[in-house]
Image (cartoon, helix red, strand yellow):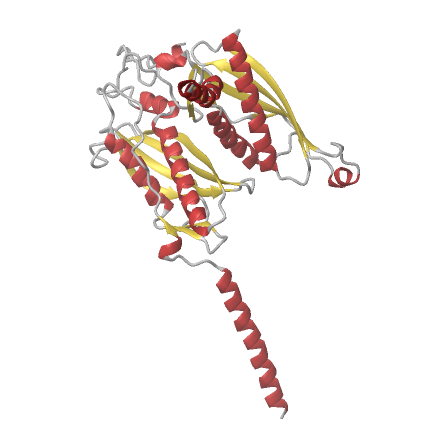
């Protein structure tokens, strides 16, 4: 009986941890590039830098990649097939309206950002997926918070997309 | 009597001015051993490999940030200061990494390529307010002294760390953040494809040009000697 109790407790302790473990770090490297922007997008130049930094930070948090490298860094040939490159374009930015946001709310007058992200395999430049992201935040928040939210969303979508690709 | 009154008013103005100046000065943080951090690379960054490694020499590191107080990295909470100039820290970090891989020449004469570094940003940049955004950005002019040809390459390093409440933790996080950004920037330089291409094109006519390392994406294909531009990396060939 005592042995059974110990075994049961051990199962309860170990099982959730074992179940939560995904086949992580499937990819050797991920390279995030600075996002470009279409004409008419009025964001500060520092925004792109901050988005780049946040994106690298968020990609590292997904634990899907052994290393998240900087833009323009070389990758060894052996790792190239298991490496991805992430490029993106900021397609639309609306700075929102503080007054409308305060009076009406519910997303009206919110600041919005649209991004198109492309994932490619480093070795053969094969397209691994295209992600469209739109985020809306209150105009009271600054650009950096918007970059933070966008990076988090992109990293989440990348993780989801790559996991589906691995399973499928 | 009236001259006494004027003198009194003048003295009053002087007192107010002196107090205001003192107050402003009190807000300005001063470097002390307690609020000064020592930033350096934790470990040298391994550069990309060359079959015939070129020797680099850093001739000078110039501050182009336009920052009047380059040692002050954080103004709030009594300030956080660097113990050395960003140019010196950058030089040490690059030299440390090159030296570890035996790519550092003793002087400019014995070097294959001379590097001139321009530091554009070193320290913290504008973040979301919820974190510390560390950024180190510099450009490097790679010059072949024999041919007088040069090429410019860019390197950027970023790091994001959590903010802290206690002053001790703020200092610790800022230090770790800048160190991570510095390491990232040095890695971006020494492992970057821009350096690979610059070395390839600047040493193409040199008799001891770096050749390819098999199985490594970061090296070069030796020229045929017919004067054509045959130095293509394997990455470019793909």
The answer to whether B76 is drawn above or below residue A154 in the figure is below
The answer to whether B105 is drawn above or below residue B48 in the figure is below
Count of all numbered marks drawn on residues in the image: 0
Whole-percent x and y of residue B180? 40, 36
Which residue is the extreme one toward the right?
A104
Seen from the viewer's position, the closer of residues A62 and B89 is: A62
Whole-percent x and y of residue B20? 55, 69
Give the image quarter of residue A89: top right
Please name the residue shown 55% across and 72% down the image: B17
Give the image quarter of residue B226: top left
Give the image quarter of residue B34: bottom left
Q: Is residue B100 left or right of residue B8?
A: left
Identify the image quadrant of the N terminus of chain A: top left
Whole-percent x and y of residue A60? 46, 26
Residue B109 visible at all = yes
Whole-percent x and y of residue A28? 40, 18
Which residue is the extreme one toward the bottom?
B1
Seen from the viewer's position, the closer of residues B8 and A15 is: A15
Please name the residue shown 35% across and 50% down the image: B83
């Amino acid at each position: 009986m005592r042995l059974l109790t110990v075994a049961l407790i051990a199962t309860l302790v170990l099982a959730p941890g074992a179940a939560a473990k995904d086949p992580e770090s499937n990819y050797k490297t991920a390279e995030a590039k600075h996002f470009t922007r279409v004409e008419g997008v009025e964001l500060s130049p520092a925004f792109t830098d901050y988005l780049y930094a946040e994106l690298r930070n968020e990609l590292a948090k997904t634990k899907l990649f052994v290393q998240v490298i900087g833009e323009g860094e070389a990758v060894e040939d052996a790792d190239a097939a298991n490496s991805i490159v992430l490029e993106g374009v900021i397609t639309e930015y609306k700075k929102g309206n503080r007054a409308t946001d305060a009076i009406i709310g519910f997303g009206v007058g919110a600041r919005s950002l649209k991004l198109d992200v492309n994932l490619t395999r480093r070795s053969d430049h094969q397209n691994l997926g295209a992600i469209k992201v739109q985020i809306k935040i209150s105009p009271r928040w600054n650009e950096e918070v918007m970059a933070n939210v966008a990076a988090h969303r992109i990293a989440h979508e990348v993780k989801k997309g790559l996991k589906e690709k691995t399973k499928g | 009597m009236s001259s006494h009154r004027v003198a009194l008013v003048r003295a009053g103005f002087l007192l107010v001015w002196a107090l205001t100046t003192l107050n402003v000065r009190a807000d300005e943080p001063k470097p002390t051993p307690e609020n000064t951090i020592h930033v350096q690379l934790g470990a040298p960054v391994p550069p990309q490999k060359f079959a015939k490694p070129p020797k680099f020499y850093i001739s000078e590191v110039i501050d182009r940030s336009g920052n009047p107080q380059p040692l002050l990295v954080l103004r709030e909470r009594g300030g956080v200061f660097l113990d050395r100039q960003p140019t010196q820290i950058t030089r040490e970090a690059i030299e440390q990494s090159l030296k570890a891989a035996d790519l550092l020449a003793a002087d400019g004469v014995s070097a294959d390529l001379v590097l001139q570094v321009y530091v554009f940003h070193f320290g913290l940049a504008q973040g979301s307010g919820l974190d510390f955004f560390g950024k180190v950005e510099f450009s490097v002019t790679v010059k072949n002294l024999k041919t007088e040809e040069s090429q410019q390459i860019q390197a950027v390093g970023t790091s994001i760390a959590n903010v802290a409440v206690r002053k001790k933790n703020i200092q610790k996080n800022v230090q770790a953040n800048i160190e991570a950004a510095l390491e990232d920037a040095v890695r971006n330089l020494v492992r970057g494809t821009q350096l690979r291409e610059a070395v390839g094109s600047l040493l193409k006519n040199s008799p001891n040009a770096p050749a390819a390392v098999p199985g490594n994406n970061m090296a070069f294909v030796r020229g045929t000697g017919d004067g054509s531009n045959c130095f293509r990396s394997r990455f470019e060939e793909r």
